[in-house]
Amino acid sequence: MLKKVLSKCRAHSTTITGLLHALPLVSLALQLDEGKKHHKQEAKSMFAISALDTRRFIPANSEAYPWHVPSTTMDNQMTLVSHMFGENLVAEIRSKAKGIPTQSHAMTQLENFVWAAAVQAREDIENKLDKGMENDPSGLMNFVKDWRVQKKQQLKKPRVGVWGVSNLGTLDGAIEGSGWKIERAVFQLSCELTSPVFHISSISVKGKEMCVDVSWQQGIIDAEIGDTLASDMEAWIRFLGAGGEE
């Protein structure tokens, strides 16, 4: 199933990360629509973020840090990519879904929107990669004198998005000869007050399966929204893996 999903991502000029943005967009656009149980007036557009590994931009064995080799050092080297899914796209998804009797029929009707959003997310990431660290907010970190104070100030501001995607990619768990090997991996991020409402975390094992985790802070939203988001994403991945709209 995963191979089929990957193949369809490539055919539509996007990636798994792009797809993992498109699926919550469709799910939440419908869940928060007018007339629905969890309707949110302000949910006319959706803002999300991706975690981006910045090791590719960091020189190895630099004069300032000769001991630091980004590709082999365990540290936190990342920045964020922003994704804005506008009012027109959200409205079109909602309009197309009205009156559709079943989930499978809805998926067939909405698949084009999924791929359009997935392509947009990939293009956002590609644009960031092309720019590198130019104008990246991480360049301002040196000016923060007290991170405890900075974090407390962030608590007074709105959350930075509806969801965030962190895709660790593929882990090669095979070994030569006999012995332990990795056949399944799980990756989960804990949510913070200053982070998006939902964290979508993904990791795959080469030749095996992909695990996608959806997490959120208990008590800040109706758990039914998160549970439906997780089940919708699973249903979409299975739908696309089974063939989707050919």
Image: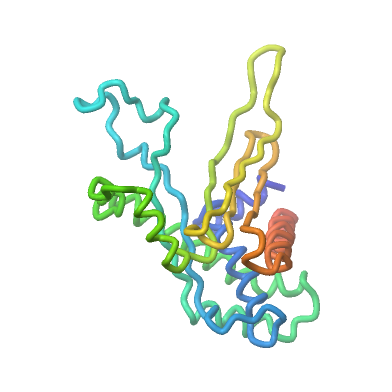
At 62% from the left and 58% from the top, the residue drawn is: 217
At 56% from the left and 84% from the top, the residue drawn is: 41
Outermost residue to the left: 63
Of residue 20 and residue 137, the one placed in the foreground of this image is 137
Q: Is residue 151 visible?
A: yes
Number of marks: 0
Q: Is residue 133 visible?
A: no
Q: Relative to residue 145, is residue 86 depicted above or below?
A: below
Outermost residue to the right: 102
Q: Relative to residue 27, is residue 190 depicted above or below?
A: above
Q: Relative to residue 71, is residue 211 depicted above or below?
A: below
Give the colour scheme shown. Answer: rainbow
Q: Relative to residue 57, is residue 199 depicted above or below?
A: below
In the image, residue 73 lies at what x, y percent?
Answer: 41, 27
Of residue 87 and residue 199, the one placed in the foreground of this image is 199
Of residue 59 and residue 245, the one placed in the foreground of this image is 59
On screen, residue 207 versus residue 61, left or right, reads right
On screen, residue 179 versus residue 70, left or right, reads right
At 66% from the left and 43% from the top, the residue drawn is: 210
Which quadrant of the view contains residue 175?
A: top right
In the image, residue 102 lies at what x, y percent?
Answer: 80, 75
Which quadrant of the view contains residue 103?
A: bottom right
In the image, residue 113 lies at what x, y percent?
Answer: 58, 71
Q: Quadrant of the C terminus?
A: bottom right
At 63% from the left and 34% from the top, the residue drawn is: 206
Of residue 28 and residue 141, the one placed in the foreground of this image is 141
